[in-house]
Amino acid sequence: AKQIVNGGTKQSLHPLVWILPQENPNFLTPLMWGGVVPSWKSGSEIEDFYKESIGYGSGLNATSEKMFTSKHFMESALHRRCVVPVTGFFEPYRVLDVTKPFSIPFHFERRDKRIINLAGIYNFTNDGHATFAILTKSATPLFEKIHHNKKRRPVILHDPQIENWLNGSAERKDLEHIMINDMSDELLLDQPISRDLYLNKVDSNRADITTPVHYPEIGIEYEGKPQRGLF
């Protein structure tokens, strides 16, 4: 779903996503995935702020290591944390040793096929628009071999951690412990999928988009990779 900004005159480029907010954790609420927009900004400034925030490494995500030291994140870290439930997510593997470098999407899901719960923080603009960011941390080995440029990964909560993450009484040390001890690589399955995901002129919103597709250009090992010569 899309969100309308600028007093109803403009459709945002950022989607509305269902989240569980700390302030009302028993109900899924649609918020704009547009990063943590400061409370002194208005809804009409969301797009401009997003473009600006990309320049200092923020954008749609928030660096968990700065959550309690950045003035931009601190208020949300203390009072507006959220959980983003998804069936899976995508990370780009960059093929560089070719004339024209390109990206191959890898799909991540839980091995037990249950919902993945991503940790996030959110905020409100001065005219009531709510936006959120997904928290990231240094890449673990599984993510580092795929996300080999920025070397980051999302903070993925274990199911029992959700209640504590959304607990308004949780202290900084408790939240930092959760982020350090989030879901391990062994509980996740990663597979390359169709490059249609990155093509604007192709409808990738289809059931088979997460079907594994193998590419000879992928230079890393992953579960289910065909033996050399079988492509």
Image: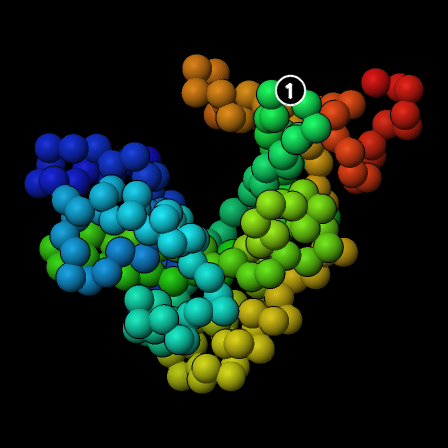
Left or right of residue 192, residue 4 in this image: left
Residue 212 as seen in the image, left or right of residue 120 = right
- The image shows residue 170 at horizontal and vertical percentages of 44, 82
Residue 122: horizontal and vertical position, in percent? 33, 60
Quadrant in the rendering for residue 209: top right
Callout 1, which amino acid? Thr
Query: From this viewpoint, which residue is outermost toward the left?
Result: 7
Q: Which residue is mark 1?
A: 99
The residue lying at 68 percent from left, 51 percent from top is 144
For residue 17, what is the image quadrant?
A: top left
In the image, residue 58 sits, relative to residue 171, either above or below, namely above
Point out the image quarter for the C terminus: top right
- Nearer to the camera, 98 or 180: 98
Residue 143 at x, y percent in the picture = 67, 50
**Residue 109 visible in the shown view:** no
Residue occupying image coordinates x 16% and y 33%: 10
Q: Residues within 10 Å of mark 1 (few under 14, many from 20)?
A: few
